[in-house]
Amino acid sequence: MVNVVLTHHVNTLVPGDAFRDWLVDILGDKIKNKYCKVDVFKYSHSSHTVCRYKFKGERYSVISKFFAEPTGKIKKYDAYEAMIKEYNNLKEVQSIINVPSPIAIHREFNCALVTEYISGKSLLWYIAQEKDLFYHLTSVAHMLNNLHNHTIQDYYDKTRDFANFHNVLDQLKLDNNTRNLFNELLGKWWYSSLLDTKHGCMIHRDATPSNYVFHKGVPYILDLESSWHNAHYARDLGILCSELKNHFQLHKGSGNLAEPYIGHFLWQYSRNETNFIKTTKLLPFFMSLGFLRSARLHRHYQHYNYLIREAIECLKSIK
């Protein structure tokens, strides 16, 4: 069964509710009836409380993410700083790519970030249906290319990628032999020049298919909370490609069935043969990381072994 984003109705706000009244105030002319009720729908499978606020009779909705209400494994962090970071990230890229427009933030409402609501189907849905998937992967590839190429920065923080890789490995609590193998292979990548690049860029970093939504055929990137600056462009590509292969292994019987889609996605991103060849050589490093990220969700299932094997084979591709 494919994981999808689910919502359920949890409340209806009426005039006099402080949060509802604040929303009506900040939205100004977008809400004609200032006394309308507001239906609240809560999202499942998110790292914080995330709700859609639908203004009755207005045909208008917003999304609010409450950073001071963590629902994932990470409970201790600076909620205010996280709220500001995503708000600034959205502001930074909204003239480059399609993202939900940031509307407002409010520390006192559990560090709420309010953005416009984007309706539509996610890339995950198109992957599951294999419906016009080449077309939708092309759109995502071009969008990521725009993000990366319009946010070029002075350096690439290679150390951070390796530290993050080891952090994910730590979470998996592998046996000593397997962990030592990963350490050895990562050492080869560290001393290789494949990942070396003069410039970094801003990346989405959480490049999972559910974070790309198509509204009337136009792609949008959701959830920029974990975005990095001074990062390697191929990280976004590797994570998404690993998600593609993982999905086809789980739901279609073989990860190899994803190869035509992966090749198409990378070609559309690269735009020319030189860049395509360069990207395909270094991509396995980030695909390996992607498989390990997924393995954290499958530790008690047989599929876990497949993900660990794939992660190792990716790293072994280095010459």
Image: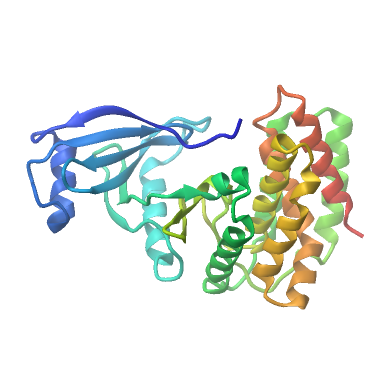
- Of 96 and 70, the residue lying toward us: 96
Residue 193 is situated, as x and y percent measured from the top left of the image, at 82, 67
Instruction: State the residue at coordinates (20%, 30%).
Output: 12
In this view, 198 is above or below 245: below
Instruction: State the residue at coordinates (68%, 41%).
Output: 247
Residue 288 is situated, as x and y percent measured from the top left of the image, at 76, 47
Q: Quadrant of residue 233?
A: bottom right
Instruction: State the residue at coordinates (32%, 45%).
Output: 63
- Of 103 and 240, the residue lying toward us: 240
Quarter of the C terminus within the rendering: bottom right
Q: Quadrant of residue 281?
A: bottom right
Q: Quadrant of residue 55?
A: top left
Image colouring: rainbow
Residue 82 can be seen, yes or no = yes
Residue 291 is situated, as x and y percent measured from the top left of the image, at 72, 42
Residue 46 is situated, as x and y percent measured from the top left of the image, at 46, 36
Quarter of the N terminus within the rendering: top right
Of all residues, the one furthest to the top in this rendering is 300
- Of 126 and 176, the residue lying toward us: 126
Is residue 6 found left or right of 293 in the rendered image?
left
